[in-house]
Amino acid sequence: MGYTIAEKILAAHAGGSPVRAGDVVVADVDFAMMHDARAGNALKMAAKLGAKGLPFAKRTALVMDHYSPPPHIEAANTHKEMRAFAEQSGAVLYDVGDGICHQVMPEGGHLTAGDLIVGTDTHSVTYGAFNALGTGVEGTDVAAVMMTGKLWFRVPETIRIELKGKLKPGVWAKDVTLNMLGRLKAEGANYRALEYTGTGVAAMEIDDRMTLANHAAELGAKAALLEADEKTIAWLAAHKARTPKPVKADVDANYVERIEIDASALPPQVARQHNIDDVVGVPEVKGQRINFALIGTCTNGRLDDIRQAAAILNGQRIAKGVRMIVTPASREIYLAASREGLIEILTRAGASFEAAGCGTCVNVTGHLITGDGDVAISSANRNFKGRLGNDKSEIWVGSSATVAASALTGFITDPREVMGGKWVAGRAA
């Protein structure tokens, strides 16, 4: 019997002998990430060990993204400690405004196909878009990695998800992930790896693949893995990543479950207020009034997301009474969007831009607070009650295209119906 991608990557990093789901291994970690919201305990542990006791610190990135810019003295002091530690240890530093950890990690060339990557955030599963096994750990685990270069893992069981056909224009990877949440429910894939495959995945660009992998965190997945193809290799090369070591599952690999999705039949999806797994097709809730629209976060703050919004809002204004915020996932994405004229399109449409970071998603900066009774539609990964600072408001979650279409009309709107539903190469014509 063959092996899954997760089994192969963990085996390669744990000495080379085959491993199976359920085995516990100590594996070499290729690169680690620590963000500011989890830096406190890790830096205390690192201080006890001293810089000389952390020989693998140079293979660690410290990212200031959750408290960006710092909303209080404690956060500002944490940032000071992170800067000092990076200077002393040689760790890579991403400062305020550089971007969200899960965007700057691949952008910075810190990972490649076949790698084992850990980070202090559940959405570290994003790196699976590049055929790397990325997973979330605690800050003290990252301190252990900086000291030894190793960490222990239990090999996860794997669910294979095949997307047959291609997504129709106006439907995106976000709609696939929401559909999966509706099927399996939140945490329905706890400590399992997901393998996404099929023609629907092959047709996706890298930005959409990152969404596909990233949103697996809400399913509780230990990892979300895609195979590497020409698009993957070209993207990694463009970002000066190390030589890729692509990993494919064997045809006779053992899966705990197999799921097939007809991508061509999938309509835009939306998660209803307070429950990320209460998912329905957008046509079922058309007409739901909204007051706030958010595009961004580590799940959907990439260039293609901004393109989707700009394509819908080009030359138009968002509905009266609607406020719209866009948060690019990185400084580089903001600059690219500026070069394409997307910033001006969305600003003229009535949107406001935040600096790259996580503040609007988890409301730690206080820059996006909803009013009592407000209804927000967001491209973020979660819609927990009170996540935007007010437990008397509602949060719905959809694709960036659905968010932009809804901001335009003032009601939850199927993006395929906007501008006559005419789409070319994934963009509204």
Image (cartoon, helix red, strand yellow):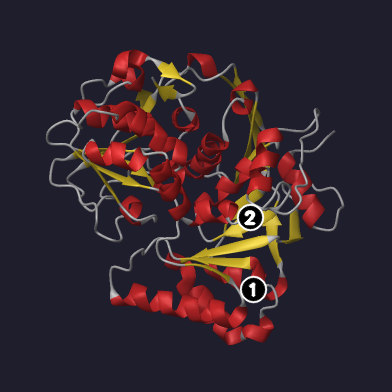
- The label shown at residue 389 is none
> Which is closer to the viewer, label 2 or label 1?
2
- In the foreground, 428 or 147: 428
- In the foreground, 169 or 274: 169
Residue at position x 53%, y 80% in the image? 85
Residue 399 seen from this side: no
Tell me the amino acid under the disc marked 1: Ala
Tell me the amino acid under the disc marked 2: Gly
Residue at position x 38%, y 15% in the image? 422
Tell me the element at label 1.
helix
Image height of 145 relative to 307, above or below: below
Which residue in the rendered view is the most extreme toward the right?
17
Residue 241 rendering spot, x and y as whole percentages: 68, 53
Q: Earlier in the sequence, mark 2 or mark 1?
A: 1
Tell me the element at label 2.
loop
Q: Which residue in the structure is indicated by mark 2?
A: 109
- In the foreground, 263 or 426: 426
Q: Quadrant of the N terminus?
A: top right
Q: Which residue in the structure is indicated by mark 1?
A: 57
